[in-house]
Image (cartoon, helix red, strand yellow):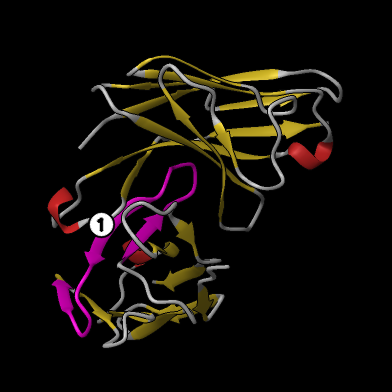
Amino acid sequence: SAVISQKPSRDICQRGTSLTIQCQVDSQVTMMFWYRQQPGQSLTLIATANQGSEATYESGFVIDKFPISRPNLTFSTLTVSNMSPEDSSIYLCSVEEGGPTGQASGANVLTFGAGSRLTVL
Amino acid sequence: TQLLEQSPQFLSIQEGENLTVYCNSSSVFSSLQWYRQEPGEGPVLLVTVVTGGEVKKLKRLTFQFGDARKDSSLHITAAQPGDTGLYLCAGSETSYDKVIFGPGTSLSVIP
């Protein structure tokens, strides 16, 4: 399965600033996904990033707040803009690939990076 | 709107005990996945189930997909401290739909 590297692994930021999270995959992938995991909660999809086109955002997330770049098939960035304490979360990058049953099964299996833990003061 | 519910939300047990975690939905899913997430890490895939009624075993873990493909369970036999973590079920209605995650079950196994 793919190996995903995310950085920074954690950061403490001041209110009103912006932070860019980088995601590097060791193989070429069509789609990359950005998730948010708020403290003690599950994962919420922010957006899907395809190379060569604008990211597709889920309800409740907008490009001005979470701009995404996808310059090639192995790399993506997520920026959290004009941060507030409510943005304190773990941000996770993931890719979709065949799992134990293989892609032929149609199973949407995800591999994740270790996440970027963001604390906004 | 697709929703996945999990129960229990929190579970604290002694080493050696058995436990079952449930994942339920009112929607039919083409497949369901179970992930385990440890602190400071991203979720890691444990298993995928795709056929209604399917049972899969992974050492001390047994996964079942409901006949109607609306629910799944994870049973752990003789839990060990290394099983501690957040267990997430996830799935999509079709292979073209986005993956949604349940709220998770936080398991703590006390030595």
Q: Quadrant of the C terminus of chain B?
A: bottom left
Is B76 drawn above or below residue A9 in the view shown?
below
Left or right of A60 on screen, residue A57: left
Q: Is residue A102 visible?
A: no
Q: Position of residue A109 (x, y in %)?
A: 29, 51
> On the picture, is A110 further left or further right than A78?
left
Is residue B93 inside the magenta stretch? no
- Dot 1 crowding, Cα within 10 Å, few <14, some 14–19, many 20+: many
Front position in the image: A38 or B98: B98
Query: Residue at 56% of width from left, 66% of height from top?
Result: B103
Task: State the SS at label 1.
Answer: loop
Q: Is residue B24 visible?
A: yes
Classify A23 as above or below B30: above
The boundaries of the magenta stretch are B31-57
The residue type indicated by label 1 comes to Ala
Q: Position of residue B51 (x, y in %)?
A: 19, 75
Q: In the picture, which quadrant includes the N terminus of chain B?
A: bottom right
In the image: residue B78, left or right of residue B84: left
Q: Where residue B3 sits in the image (x, y, percent)? A: 54, 70
